[in-house]
Image (cartoon, helix red, strand yellow):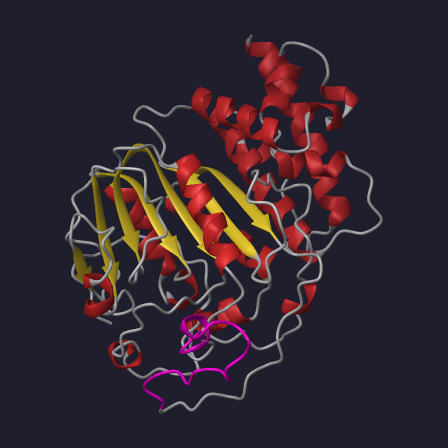
Amino acid sequence: MKEGRQVDFNPVLKPHERLRLDESPDALFYQVPRVGVHHVDEAWRVQLTDLYRRLLLPGSSILDLCSSWTSHLPPNVIHHTVLGHGMNEAELEANTQLTGGFVVQDLNLRATLSWVKDGSMDAVLLANGWQYLQRPEVVASEALRVLRPGGSLMVSFSDACWPEKAVAGWLDRGGEERQLLISKILQNAGFHQVQQFSRVPPAHTPASPPAAPSRTSTHPSPPAASSSSESEAASAPVMPPTSKHTSTRTAPSSSHPTPDLQPGASPDPFYAIYAFKPPKGFTRADRMEASRRRGGMGLGAEHVSSSLSGGGGAEVAASLQGPALREMDVPRLSVSASTLERWVDAYEELVADARAMGIPASAVPSLPRDADEGSVRAARQHLTAMIASFASANI
């Protein structure tokens, strides 16, 4: 793969998870303009525009990655500049919201954004395009580079995609697991305060698996026409094949903060991940405060175990308990694989905080390779007590 500039990144996807059914050139696949074609339903688009309206400040400098003929930005909000990126020149040319121009580039051939200056953007948007990235870790690192300190990245997606061009690691996961995957990649890249939003209709079920695509196809075949409008039916993406993971899609768990999105169930489930670039001079104290703010969006302080309710060191330990760790204090009959993965990731963050405080690595409880619910709970309880004791001795 071509690369204009070397970018260091921590791989999250395994090599086989980057493979696709159709490895033909992406430029051929996307060569037919689809101006006026919506790949998600109206309710999904309204939710995304509403989220942009509330989370993007007017006058911002915005980079819209994997864009097309619309950026879904609120039409009555004026931004300083909106720079676009995509795969089809005619579609980008038709996007009147791209006031700063656009660049046509295949991110699977060159994942760096050399045409965007360091720290020049207030926000980076990526709607319904992450599933096609073979090196999302590099794209995430580049998004972090081009953002100003305190700038934000928002990734949104539905269940719809062209399965022949989506990577295997995407097709083998369901909605919540995809959120966790993106969140992990963003955290590894250096983003903080990673938040997950979702709105999944209770009755939502994946469509029947499509026929296996030809490996030699150069563009997707449109699905059969339905009762929906012609512009939404023609050349619209199909649903991904059902797998052992996609059957687990359910209503969003209470552990994920859900914003007040547009009311009403949407046939297309809505998922979004919102993260920030740390401000300059971001210290451990800033991280503790960020953890405190994350706790306010999670399960709430009433779920923190009573052993952490004291003052001094206990307050320090409690401030490091984000939503995923506080989940462990909520009685539950079973813990899913995705929940356990979230707990393990949250515990690793707690370990990093403990090491930053000066607690020796030899004293920090480590998780076994095949960590289960009990071992994660026990390690968290042990380390939390250790943090409280260490902090008390240094206050």
Q: Is any part of residue 97 visible from this angle?
A: yes
Percent position of residue 153, x then y: 37, 44
Q: Could you tell whether 208 is left or right of 72 in the image?
A: right
Q: Could you tell whether 232 is left or right of 107 in the image?
A: right
| Nearer to me, 357 or 180 | 180
Q: Could you tell whether 189 is left or right of 337 in the image?
A: left
Q: Main secondary structure of the magenta part?
A: loop
Res 348 → quadrant: top right
Against 292, is 132 above or below? below
User: Which residue is found at the position 37% from the left and 67% from the top?
Assistant: 134
Q: Is any part of residue 181 visible from this angle?
A: no
Image quadrant in which the C terminus is located = top right
| Nearer to me, 210 or 389 | 210
211 falls in the magenta region: no
The span shown in magenta is 217-236
Percent position of residue 9, x then y: 34, 53
Image quadrant in which the N terminus is located = bottom left
